[in-house]
Image (cartoon, grey):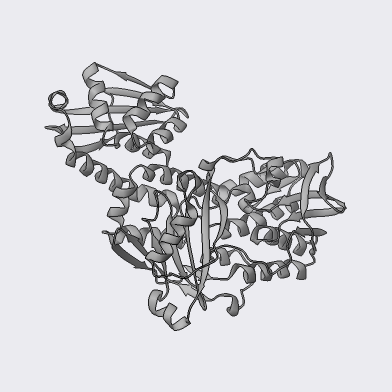
Amino acid sequence: MHDLIVIGGGPAGSSAALTAAKAGLYVLLLEKESFPRYKPCGGALSNRSFSDLDFRLPEELCERAITGARVHFHNKMIEGHSRDPLFSLVTRSEFDKFLLQKANDAGCNTVTMRAEGYLEKEDHVEVITKRKKFKSRFLVDASGCQSRLRYCIQDGANKSQYGISVVTEIEDDDAKIQERLHNSLDFYFDVGSTGYGWIFPHKGYYSVGIWGQASNLNSLRTNMQNFLARVGFRGRYRLHGHKIPLGGINRRIARGRIILAGDSAGFADPITGEGIYYALRSGQIAAQAILEQDPSDVSRIYEEMCKKDFGQDLENALHLLHSLNGSREMCLSALVERDDIINNYIDVMAAKKTYKAFADWILPIIIHIYIDNFNKRANKIPKFIKVLIGRERINFKMIHNDGSVRRTGLYFEKDRIAKVIEGGLKNPTIVMAATQDAIIRIQRSSNPIAAMKRERQNGGVSIKAKSIGTEIKLNAVLSAAGVVRLLNHNFF
């Protein structure tokens, strides 16, 4: 019987196998394909990924050091740079082959064989293939987001829980690549209603693709072809599509002796789609939990370690994504006008700043964007509502289903928001109680008033106001899609 069986030889699987084998465990890794194998991926390996490795990558694997990023939006472009490298660009087939070889050198036994399923027994896990069955004390499923094996312990995913990427590689001369992009990654945020298009400068080729939330992406091949033509690539290219989970969603990632790692567990940045770091780190944590804990406690410890290490930051990234989705045009328009926004986000990419810190910094900016947008639209508010609003302060008390409370005040002067007042409001004009899911649905809606009405009918939101006039004011403010997001600020 093996101590550990790992399914999947990508970064998560190889990382788990390497860590366990170096510690002396008897490890078997099952991989359905022979390496090197093609892997659709931009290949941007963040520098924090290196910090957790106890070995250096060969220079030939690191094709280009990236220090900056360019953001394009509606014919405007802004560029930001870091003093230190942010990413190293790698070809995934070669990077994955290298990691798997490191695991084999440490004592892992790799077999090219597809796992068809697995069953948890009282004191071991049984892995089923077409040819034979394997037994192990523990199992790490790192078979990826495309595989259905994870559904043995995890519920099925709908389109709102994962993204889709389409990618191709375009050969070109290194001198031309350097002249076009230098040491920057190129992002285009106007290729769809979510996500972005990208051009990454590798050695001898570009990685070009689009990525976005599956629930908001349609006609992928057409969108990709249009994007390629737009950025100057007019040949016929082979396109590869794959799913990427949105990280930060509450999923089951372990049960008993079975652990999910990497994409199988849903570990990927919901804003950028980057997953290599989370794959490497979750693989290491899986092996550490197996090595250090009592068998009956492994799954709980793994979940706690992942939550502490990176899980909370993924949740914060997801909340930030939901907060910005309803105001994407406004926020991106601000992004290409302000150096400080891209420079602060580069700090997140460089792991110098968490998503919580970034959200705390950017949300006041977003609040003012909302206010400006509301005030620009104030002349469209019916006159009788303007009379009701008049000159006064509307105090909100927001009670979330977790018991937390948010107090916010909006001070109006002649139908325009003059300022936002935070905290200290003991006598609220409006008291709202809402579940987090209801708030998220309202945020995503293009018609917040209609969404609010639906949530009130379904019990997700309740509102107590002093008068019908107050409720009309509430609807007037919601027409700018601002207040709900202001109140949602405390989720960070």
Q: Residue at x 43, y 48 (%)?
A: 356
Taking depth in this image into account, of 240 and 63 the one nearest to the observer is: 240
Q: Position of residue 368 (x, y in %)?
A: 25, 45
Decide if residue 68 is in sight here.
yes
Q: Position of residue 467 (x, y in %)?
A: 24, 16
Taking depth in this image into account, of 201 and 169 the one nearest to the observer is: 169
Q: Tell me: residue 439, above or below residue 22.
A: above
Taking depth in this image into account, of 3 and 7 the one nearest to the observer is: 7
Taking depth in this image into account, of 306 and 62 the one nearest to the observer is: 62
Q: Position of residue 350 (x, y in %)?
A: 46, 63
Q: How many marks?
A: 0
State the image quarter where residue 250 is shown.
top right
Position of 21 with respect to 242 (left or right) is right
State the image quarter where residue 347 is shown.
bottom left
Q: Tell me: residue 245, above or below residue 414.
A: below
Q: Position of residue 461 (x, y in %)?
A: 40, 24
Looking at the image, which residue sits at the far top? Answer: 467
State the image quarter where residue 482 is shown.
top left
Looking at the image, which residue sits at the far front? Answer: 236
Decide if residue 352 is in sight here.
no
Position of 183 with respect to 334 (left or right) is right
Position of 28 with respect to 90 (left or right) is right
Q: Tell me: residue 87, above or below residue 269.
A: below
Q: Residue at x 53, y 69 (%)?
A: 169
Q: Residue at x 64, y 61 (%)?
A: 11
Q: Residue at x 75, y 64 (%)?
A: 22
Quadrant where the C terminus sits is top left
